[in-house]
Image (spheres, rainbow, N blue to C red):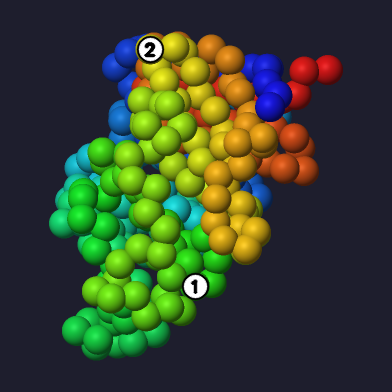
């Protein structure tokens, strides 16, 4: 277990009124969406200088930010009005599904018939907060009540049931919330979890050796985190040895090893 130090930060205007909803690493810089309905692009080495580009979105209420492929400067945003926008962050002039029903749908977008596009469905049994691929066949689902489970498309589980059910992560890793899960290669992932009452956020490794399990000896602490506010998103730049977090305090922070 070791700790990182906050070395850089950006504060959105009107602290307490603007939430950072999600952050995403791209080849063009660090992309972020916030509750003021903007998509922002930052120089990842100079957060304090503010966005180098900022776009106003038109989703009613923006909820999602995804890259077209890992580290791609082409990103997609979506929101409550059902619209999806594609942005090329290299050019300022260019502008897996889950839901509250608890189902995680695996879709083959090469299929034109919308009635046939869903190739497999997993029933998580609770409203989905985050879902995504861990590798080519395995999927994670995290509910709004912090229940985490893993599913495998390659195994014919009855009724799409979980191959590994962690249940309520709040009792498993002694946290108040889980922000997300990020894959790190085909047999590892990082869980970001926090306790706002303790001003704490941790990165906990999940490894497959051969089955999936929590690696309690490989935990990274971010002391102070975002204070009393929830960390909404995090991402890791391994080559630069930096972790970025975005929180409900309207800040994006950069964390690095203590020299």
Report the side of 196 relative to 210 (left or right): left
From where the camera sits, is residue 32 visible?
no
Assign a secondary structure to mark 1.
Answer: loop
User: In the rendered image, which residue does mark 1 sit on?
Assistant: 137
Spot occupied by residue 98 in the image (x, y as percentages of width and height): 28, 58
Spot occupied by residue 146 in the image (x, y as percentages of width and height): 32, 39
| Quarter of the rendering containing residue 62 | top left
The quadrant of the image that shows the C terminus is: top right
Residue at image point 20% right, 55% down: 125
Looking at the picture, tell me which residue is in the foreground, 246 or 49.
Answer: 246
Report the side of 15 relative to 125 (left or right): right
| Quarter of the rendering containing residue 19 | top left
Neighbour class for label 2 at 10 Å: few (<14), some, many (≥20)? few
Residue at image point 54% right, 56% down: 212
Assign a secondary structure to mark 2.
Answer: helix
User: In the rendered image, which residue does mark 2 sit on?
Assistant: 197
Residue at image point 42% right, 58% down: 164
Looking at the picture, tell me which residue is in the foreground, 138 or 15.
Answer: 138
Residue at image point 68% right, 27% down: 1
Spot occupied by residue 83 in the image (x, y as percentages of width and height): 24, 56
Mark 2–mark 1 distance (CA, rounded to whole Å) = 37 Å
249 over 162 or under it: above or below: above
| Quarter of the rendering containing residue 179 | top left
From where the camera sits, is residue 186 visible?
yes
């Amino acid at each position: 277990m070791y700790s990182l130090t906050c070395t850089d930060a950006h504060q959105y205007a009107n602290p307490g009124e603007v939430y950072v909803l999600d952050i995403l690493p791209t080849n063009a810089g660090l992309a972020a969406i916030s509750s003021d309905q903007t998509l922002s692009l930052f120089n990842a080495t100079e957060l304090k200088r503010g966005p180098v580009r900022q776009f106003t979105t038109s989703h009613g209420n923006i909820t999602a930010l995804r890259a077209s492929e890992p580290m791609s400067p082409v990103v997609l945003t979506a929101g409550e009005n059902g619209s999806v926008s594609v942005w090329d962050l290299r050019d300022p002039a260019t502008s897996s599904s889950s839901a509250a029903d608890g189902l995680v749908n695996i879709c083959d977008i090469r299929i034109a018939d919308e009635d046939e596009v869903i190739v497999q469905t997993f029933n998580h049994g609770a409203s989905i907060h985050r879902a995504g691929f861990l590798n080519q066949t395995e999927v994670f689902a995290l509910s709004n009540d912090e229940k985490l489970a893993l599913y495998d498309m390659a195994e014919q589980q009855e009724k799409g049931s979980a191959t590994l059910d962690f249940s309520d992560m709040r009792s498993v890793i002694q946290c108040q919330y889980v922000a997300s899960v990020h894959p790190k290669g085909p047999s590892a992932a990082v869980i970001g979890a926090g306790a706002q009452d303790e001003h704490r956020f941790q990165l906990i490794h999940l490894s497959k050796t051969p089955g999936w399990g929590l690696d309690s000896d490989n935990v990274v602490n971010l002391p102070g985190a975002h204070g009393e506010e929830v960390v909404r998103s995090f991402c890791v730049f391994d080559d630069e040895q930096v972790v970025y977090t975005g929180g409900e305090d309207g800040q994006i922070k950069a964390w690095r090893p203590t020299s």
